[in-house]
Amino acid sequence: MFIINFKNYEEVSGANASKLAKIAEKISKKYKIKIAVVPPQHLLSEIAKISIPVLAQHVDVANTGSTTGFIVPEIIKKSNVSGSLINHSEHRISEKEITELVSRLKKLGMISVVCVKDVSEAKKYAKLNPDYIAIEPPELIGTGKAVSKEKPEVITKSVMAVKQAKNSTKLLCGAGIVSGKDVAKAMQLGAKGILVASGIIKAKNWNDIVEEFALAISKSKKG
């Protein structure tokens, strides 16, 4: 899994969000790897028209009905949204909310990606059996310093923590990834994919960088 988080960067405002999503869709088909995009919340229904998974940046535990301003899983599912990030470093929530949301998304047949800051959180939340645990040390997010190079032991220990849960959860690696080499190293250390934001959004050529990352994942699968 290769997840591109658009965050709320100006570079992907307006029509640019659809442009990047379509690039991801094209390259996903070319290399036969799963790429998911995570656009700003107000663009979810528009971007969800493409053929690759579209995830929300966050969902709330609020229910359908009179819950103004909340992102409700059951509602976004009806707009063909495939799932959501949960507990991103920039939008942390409580353990109780994480537990409820993983269960709720699972019942809806939606993808859950629980973001964690360290190995202990990876171990704790892997037990909930989300589809993915994404390990992202907060101090490396957006720095251009990849966790696979700066703190490789965080990935290897998180891989073991997830395996100990003995379920279907897979580990993704995030924080500071800016090159195909960073991606290849993360995969070599045992990650099953990546979660990346500024490394792609801030790049000069989206097509080239998405393809570089996809190629690294494709080669690691074959290897």
Image (cartoon, helix red, strand yellow):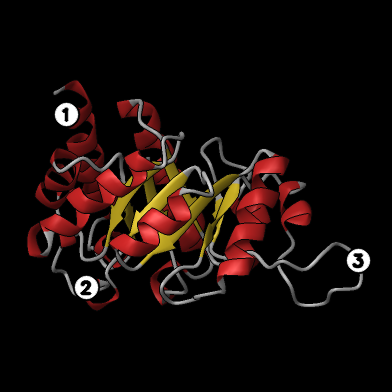
Q: Residue at x 56, y 68 (%)?
A: 95
Residue 51 location, x and y as percent?
55, 35
Camera-side mark, 3 or 1 = 3
Q: Quadrant of residue 199?
A: bottom left
Q: Residue at x 16, y 69 (%)?
A: 144
Are the residues at dot 3 and dot 2 in contact (C-beta closer than 8 Å)? no
- Left or right, 20 with reference to 42: left
Camera-side mark, 1 or 2 = 2
Which amino acid type corresponds to the residue marked 2 in the rendered image?
Answer: Leu
Going from the N terminus, do you reach mark 1 or mark 2 first?
2
- Left or right, 159 with reference to 165: left
Instruction: Using a 10 Å C-alpha cutoff, classify the residue at mark 1 as few (fewer than 14 neighbours), some (14 to 19) or many (20 or more).
Output: few
Residue 138 location, x and y as percent?
29, 75
Camera-side residue of 95 and 63:
95
Check disc 2 and report the residue beneath it.
140
Going from the N terminus, do you reach mark 3 or mark 1 first?
3
Check disc 1 and report the residue beneath it.
219
Instruction: Using a 10 Å C-alpha cutoff, classify the residue at mark 3 as few (fewer than 14 neighbours), some (14 to 19) or many (20 or more).
Output: few
Q: Quadrant of residue 206?
A: bottom left
Are the residues at dot 3 and dot 1 in contact (C-beta closer than 8 Å)? no
User: The residue tagged with tag 1: helix, strand or loop?
Assistant: helix
Residue 110 location, x and y as percent?
63, 43
Which amino acid type corresponds to the residue marked 1 in the rendered image?
Answer: Lys
Camera-side residue of 203 and 104:
104
Check disc 3 and report the residue beneath it.
65
Which amino acid type corresponds to the residue marked 3 in the rendered image?
Answer: Gly
Q: Which mark is on residue 159?
A: none
